[in-house]
Image (tube, rainbow, N blue to C red):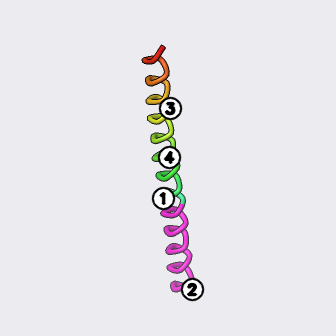
Amino acid sequence: MQNLLQRDLGLSLLSIAIFLGWLGLFFVFLRVLTISIKKILEALFRKS
């Protein structure tokens, strides 16, 4: 029973770690996207 609980805890922690990793990647992607959009808009408005 103890072994089963430990394995479930490990699986839960792994799932949380994977979820947080994907969340982190999503925020990094969002940040890069917003910075690139900002640069594009700045370049467009600087020309005109």
Q: Earlier in the sequence, mark 2 or mark 3?
A: 2
Is residue 42 rendered to the left or right of residue 8?
left
Q: Earlier in the sequence, mark 1 or mark 3?
A: 1
Disc 2 residue crowd, few under 14, some 14–19, many 20+, Cα 10 Å: few
Residue drawn at x 47%, y 51% is 24
- Magenta region's main secondary structure? helix
* Amino acid type assigned to the residue bearing label 1 in the image: Gly
* Amino acid type assigned to the residue bearing label 3 in the image: Ile
In the rendered image, which residue does mark 1 sit on? Answer: 21
Q: Earlier in the sequence, mark 2 or mark 1?
A: 2
Q: Label 2, secondary structure: give it.
A: loop
Residue 17 picture location, percent across and down: 48, 63
Disc 4 residue crowd, few under 14, some 14–19, many 20+, Cα 10 Å: few
- The magenta segment: 1-18
Separation of marks 3 and 4 at Cα, in angstroms: 12 Å
In the rendered image, which residue does mark 4 sit on? Answer: 29
